[in-house]
Image: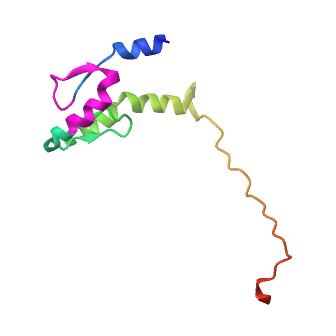
Amino acid sequence: MVTKENERMSSKMFTCPYNPVHVMKITRAHHHIVNCRKAHAHKKFIICSYNALHHYAPEDEAKHLETCSDRIALIDAAYVSYGMKSVVTGNLTMPPPAQFQFDDDENWDSD
């Protein structure tokens, strides 16, 4: 069954960071980028910690991490803004410590 999401994803195109001539559907990008990274090992690209398809030169790291669309989406998902105040969403409370009860029937010192 083809859903609108699958149809939308299959129509997106991906340009390889190692060779801009390599353009393919986004659904093939993960497989391609693994092979292309091996073929271009001399480039020493860094992989983005927010999206494994983002590969960039070390000198571009600061700029990429600052403007990465997936980082921004992650921050937007983690924080809900109410006016000028941002709050973290979700339940952040710690559960109470577990209470263990041990049987006093055994005495390991008596052996």
Which range is magenta?
A: 17-37
Residue drawn at x 34%, y 31% as measured from the top left:
68
Residue 23 location in percent, x, y? 22, 20
Residue drawn at x 26%, y 33% as measured from the top left:
33
**Residue furthest out toward the right:** 105
Looking at the picture, does residue 27 appear above or below residue 45? above
Residue drawn at x 16%, y 28% as measured from the top left:
19
Is residue 97 left or right of 23 when viewed as pictured?
A: right
Residue drawn at x 46%, y 15% as measured from the top left:
5
Is residue 93 left or right of 101 when viewed as pictured?
A: left
Looking at the picture, does residue 97 appear above or below residue 85? below
Residue 109 location in percent, x, y? 77, 87
Looking at the picture, does residue 70 appear above or below residue 26? below
* Labels in figure, total: 0
Residue 51 located within the stretch drawn in magenta: no
Is residue 96 left or right of 66 when viewed as pictured?
A: right
Residue 92 location in percent, x, y? 64, 43
Viewer-closest of 82 and 59: 59
Colour scheme of the picture = rainbow
